[in-house]
Image: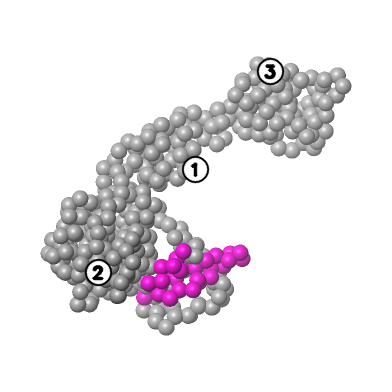
Amino acid sequence: MITFEEAFRIVTESSFRLGREVVSLSEAAGRALTLPVRSDMDMPPWNKSAVDGYACRHTDLGHELTVLETVAAGVMPQKEVVPGTCSRIMTGAAVPAGADYVFMLEDSEELSDGRVKFTGRAGNDNIAKAGEDIMKDQTVLRSGHYIKPQDVAVLASVGAMEVTVSCRPRIGVISTGDELVEPDIVPAGAQIRNSNASQLMAQIARAGARGKYYGIARDDVESITSLLKKALEENDVVLISGGVSFGDFDLVPRVMRSLGLTIHFDQVAMQPGKPLTFCTGDKKAVFGLPGNPVSVFVQFEVMVRAFLDRMAGVSEQAPVLQMPLAADYSRKKAERMSWIPCTITAAGEALPVEYHGSAHISAMTGAWGVIIIPRGQSWIQKGEMVSVRQV
């Protein structure tokens, strides 16, 4: 059994890169950039009013001002503001030449002769300066960045109608176990529904990869070999859940070796997910995941997702926050790193949810994240700082 840190190092160092492709702006969300994106213009492209009001010279704030024109958003001003004058202006409109201050409508008084007067107290100039958000040729999104919805807005604002991204990994999903039936079947006797495959397919989609489900392999070498061989031929990565422990019917490692795969480890000192098995072939990787759904969920988020990130050229890791513990916590055994589902209280504390072990997947539906408890630590007092990762 190796430490989590050693297993994580092996997984991330074993990753291999895929090719790149060009996709349209509408298809960019969730993809990983392989080339940086630069702006084709200053943002804003001109001094822009941040409020509805009057554009004037700061030195004229105490004077009665003649209104030259009204400048609406989308219309360039036609007149220069000179001493004793101003222009009525709308939010987002270009500030006319000569003006260096915009006072708000609510700080103005219209006089009987049509002139206006500033009635407020001088403060910020209410002008967004040209290029203060983005400069022309500035890198707005770097290589190795996953494109989020807010990034799509940035791409649109700089006219990036196409971007170069990493190809999406193809991931095969296999479940194992004679006890499993698909979710549409009512279990009979000792049967249970297969939740792992559906969960993994959803996690794969969230990670921006392409998943394909190959079904349930029965607990015999022939069935496992057939599905695993087919999945390896058609995918870059295969995730197979169950059959990786040390029972009489845990046959997956034997099949992995028979297919020429190199097993790098088959036990990790973490809970849940101790019997995680990781192996590689020629531009192929297989994760032998435990059978319990919480173990599968955590191992995907921690290990598989890290591998997929490296495949896409993404080096940034999921942030781990330091938060005070909301209640005392203890555990009987401390030889493994533990990942405990938790919520976040209104006071900003991490509170473990009711959790009965790695088969208790419904505990994750109410969890914001997981508390990471180091090896050797069996007791944590309320108020102590703990490491929390959002999942």
What residue did someone put label 2 on?
Answer: 177
**Nearer mark to the viewer, of 3 and 1:** 1
Q: Amino acid at mark 1?
A: Gln
Please rate how many residues cluster around mark 1, counting C-alpha atoms within 10 Å: few if below 14, some from 14 to 19, many from 20.
Answer: few
Residue 334 in view, yes or no: yes
Look at the image and say whether residue 354 sits in the magenta stretch. Answer: yes
Q: Would you say residue 142 is visible in this rendering?
A: no
Mark number for residue 150?
A: 1
If you read the primary sequence from the N terminus, does the residue marked by circle 3 or circle 1 appear first?
3
Q: Position of residue 51 (x, y in %)?
A: 68, 33
- Circle 2 Cα neighbour tier, 10 Å, few/some/many (<14 / 14–19 / ≥20): many
Q: Is residue 385 above or below residue 330?
A: above
> Quarter-wise, where is residue 225 in the image?
bottom left
Q: Position of residue 168 (x, y in %)?
A: 30, 46
User: Could you tell which of marks 2 and 1 lies nearer the N-terminus?
Assistant: 1
Residue located at (78% from left, 34% from top): 106
Residue 322 magenta-drawn?
Answer: no
Question: Where's the C terminus, which quadrant?
Answer: bottom left
Tag in front: 3 or 2: 2
In the picture, measured across the screen, residue 356 lies left or right of residue 117, that is left
> Where residue 386 sits in the image (x, y, percent)?
50, 69
Marks 2 and 1, how far apart in space?
A: 42 Å
**Which residue matches tag 3?**
80
Judge by depth and name the residue closer to the eye, 225 or 191. 191
Q: Position of residue 184 (x, y in %)?
A: 33, 61
Magenta extent: 336-365
As drawn, the residue found furthest toward the right would be 112
